[in-house]
Image (cartoon, rainbow, N blue to C red):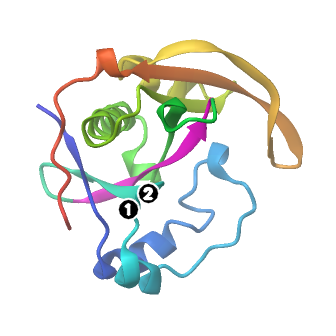
Amino acid sequence: MNRVRLRQATVADAGLLERWQQPAYIGEFNRFGIPPRPLRDEIREHGLVGSDRGALIVELVADSTPIGTVSWHPELYGPNAESVAWNIGINLIPEGRGRGYGGEAQRLLADWLFASTAANRVEAMTDVENVAEQRALEKAGFRREGILYGSQFRGGAWRDLVVYSLLRAQAGSPPTIASG
């Protein structure tokens, strides 16, 4: 049984999500120097889930405590619609890290994306130094593919990323995404 579930953000979550944009909550591998943005109006107007990208809240099943977010955006590997893959990411608050929740949440997101879109591939990339995330992705069933050298600019330097993927043939049963 899963210890985490995914749900859509509501306007009531806006303050929490805005707080999670602060340095104290962002993991060292997610610090890109992007200024925090207000989310209340965005959530009210159209939510955080769109047809081409989105974000969901990760919460504990036991007590509905929110512990982070997962997100996705498209990557095109050809000019046709069939060549789209979903690139996913995660940010857990400090209290949610190191307990295996990240792998569970990312697998739930991948299975949901396979169930709700035609994509054949879900991928994730992480810093070569982010060993905890690499373990989480492997536990979630993602396969390590290789390294993209000098591909991400973070913290004033170019970073190498490890690429992981999960294909539709490896998908599990689709999870339910709560509406909030």
Label at residue 54 = 2
Q: Quadrant of the C terminus?
A: bottom left
Neighbourhood count class around disc 2 (C-alpha, 10 Å): few under 14, some 14–19, many 20 upward: some
SS state under label 1: loop
Q: Nearer the viewer, residue 119 or 177?
A: 119
The one of 150 and 82 positioned closer to us in this rendering: 82
- Relative horizontal placement of residue 127, taking residue 72 as reference (left or right): right
- At a point 73% along the width and 55% down the height, the residue shown is 32
**In the structure shown, which secondary structural element does the residue marked by tag 2 occupy?**
strand
| Position of residue 24 measured from the top left corner of the image (x, y, whole percent) | 58, 62
Residue matched to label 1: 49
Q: Are marks 2 and 1 in contact (CB under 8 Å)?
A: yes
Q: Earlier in the sequence, mark 2 or mark 1?
A: 1
Task: Measure the alpha-carbon separation of dots 2 and 1.
Answer: 4 Å
Image side of residue 98 versus residue 128, left or right:
left
Q: Which residues are magenta?
A: 65-77
Residue 35 sits inside the magenta stretch: no
Residue plotted at (32% across, 31% down): 107
Picture quadrant of residue 47: bottom left
Q: What is the three-letter code of the residue carrying label 1? A: Val
